[in-house]
Image (spheres, grey):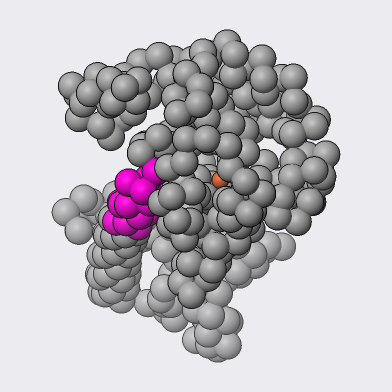
């Protein structure tokens, strides 16, 4: 401890205060004294101390009670109780309640000094411990961030691998991920749910891996068998991810991302709030991106068209609360769609134009 130790002595015996204050000051300590609990409480509010020496018999208020009150005011204080020889039980009780040391009366200046040195060692150890814990916590949270980053890059690669099968949807999952982040912010979705939403957005169509290239690449209308095959992709997604425990919490969002708010969607025809919230968010973002993307059978729509569609089908296909959140964040969607960097942050600059050209070809 390089800083001078700041000490407060609380005792109703004035001669103790008068005797030890100058002696301790001679040893280089900052010392103040209080003869009543009220004075002591006032002093710790006004001044800053490290160690408080408290007599156990202070008239109506016991020393232990005073220690309790002082701890509430300043939890960083260290206490030493001063008791008569006959009151060792009280000293033990004080130690149990957090006092660092005790002095038995009568005591001498050396006892005081030894106690201060002992408590200072304890303070130094506690400070070291706190610093160690803080740095461990920091390292743990850095590791957690690193793992989270790795987790999302793996998900991104999985999504990319899946999109390679279906050229028309290149970047779709990641864009849905970006859009759903805007909705998450608009409805104040909490941290864990927000991460789950990001993961589910990236993987919502992973089940398309199980659909034949012929069906995915077909230009004309799909027959009923082919349509059924496409409709199986949420279930196939669940089958693919089910063996991995980490994905269990996002399976409901994947399974139900094609449910309609009025119950006319698939695979289970769930309606309203029976559809998991994350799935209701993905549905809106999925549709928004689909309208803005080129398809073999139609050209890409505008942001305005997508906005009108979402409002038109609010309450039928989409949860009105999510559409409301979309309308609230609408400018952000428009900006993300309209700006290359925001629209597709992971894509290196220059590639955006190439991507757009490929999409329009
Ligand atoms: Fe889908």
Q: Find residue 134 and report its image quarter.
A: bottom left
Location of ligand 1 given as a quarter of the image? top right
Assign the magenta stretch its main secondary structure: helix
Q: Is residue 158 left or right of residue 311?
A: left
| Residue at the (49%, 48%) spot, across then down | 215
Q: Image quadrant of residue 50?
A: bottom left
**Residue at image location 40% in from the left, 14% down from the top:** 338
The residue drawn where x is 66% and y is 49% is 224
Q: Can you give x and y, in whole percent of width and height, for residue 51 in the image?
A: 38, 60
Q: Is residue 31 magenta?
A: no
Judge by depth and name the residue closer to the eye, 110 or 276: 276
Quick check: 86 left or right of 271? left
Range covered by the magenta-colored residues = 148-166
Above/below status of 273 relative to 124: above
The image position of residue 119, as x and y in percent, is 32, 69
Give coordinates of residue 222: x percent, y percent: 58, 42
Q: Residue at x 60, y 61 (%)?
A: 235
On whether residue 159 falls in the magenta region, the answer is yes
**Measured from the top left, where is residue 92 in percent x and y?**
53, 85
Asked if residue 147 can be seen in this view, the reply is yes
User: Is 229 left or right of 268, judged from the image as shown?
Assistant: left
């Amino acid at each position: 401890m390089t800083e001078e130790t700041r000490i407060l002595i609380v005792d109703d015996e004035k001669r103790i205060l008068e005797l030890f204050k100058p002696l301790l000051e001679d040893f280089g300590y900052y010392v103040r004294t209080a003869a009543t609990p009220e004075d002591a409480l006032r002093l710790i509010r006004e001044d800053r101390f490290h160690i408080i020496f408290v007599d156990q018999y202070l008239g109506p208020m016991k020393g232990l009670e005073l220690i309790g009150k002082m701890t509430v005011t300043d939890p960083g204080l260290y206490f030493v109780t001063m008791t008569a020889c006959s009151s060792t039980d009280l000293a033990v009780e004080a130690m149990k309640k957090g006092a660092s040391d005790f002095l038995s009366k009568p005591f001498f200046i050396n006892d005081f000094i030894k106690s201060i040195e002992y408590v200072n060692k304890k303070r130094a150890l506690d400070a070291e411990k706190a610093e160690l814990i803080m740095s461990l916590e920091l390292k743990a949270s850095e590791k957690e961030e690193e793992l989270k980053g790795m987790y999302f890059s793996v998900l991104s690669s999985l999504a990319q691998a899946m999109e390679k099968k279906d050229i028309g949807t290149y970047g779709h999952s990641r864009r849905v991920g970006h859009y759903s982040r805007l909705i998450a912010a608009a409805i104040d979705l909490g941290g864990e749910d927000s991460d789950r939403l990001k993961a589910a957005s990236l993987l919502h169509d992973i089940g398309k891996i199980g659909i034949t290239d012929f069906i995915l690449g077909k230009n004309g209308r799909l027959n009923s068998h082919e349509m059924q095959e496409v409709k199986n992709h949420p279930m196939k997604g669940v089958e693919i991810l089910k063996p991995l425990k980490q994905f269990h919490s996002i399976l409901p969002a994947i399974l139900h991302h094609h449910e309609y708010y009025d119950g006319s969607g698939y695979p289970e025809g769930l309606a309203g709030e029976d559809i998991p919230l994350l799935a209701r968010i993905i549905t809106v973002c999925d549709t928004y991106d689909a309208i803005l993307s080129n398809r073999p059978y139609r050209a890409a729509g505008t942001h305005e068209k997508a906005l009108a569609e979402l409002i038109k089908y609010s309450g039928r296909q989409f949860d009105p609360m999510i559409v409301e959140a979309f309308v609230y964040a609408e400018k952000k969607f428009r900006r993300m769609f309209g700006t290359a960097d925001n629209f597709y942050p992971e894509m290196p600059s220059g590639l955006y134009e190439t991507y757009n050209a490929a999409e329009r070809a």
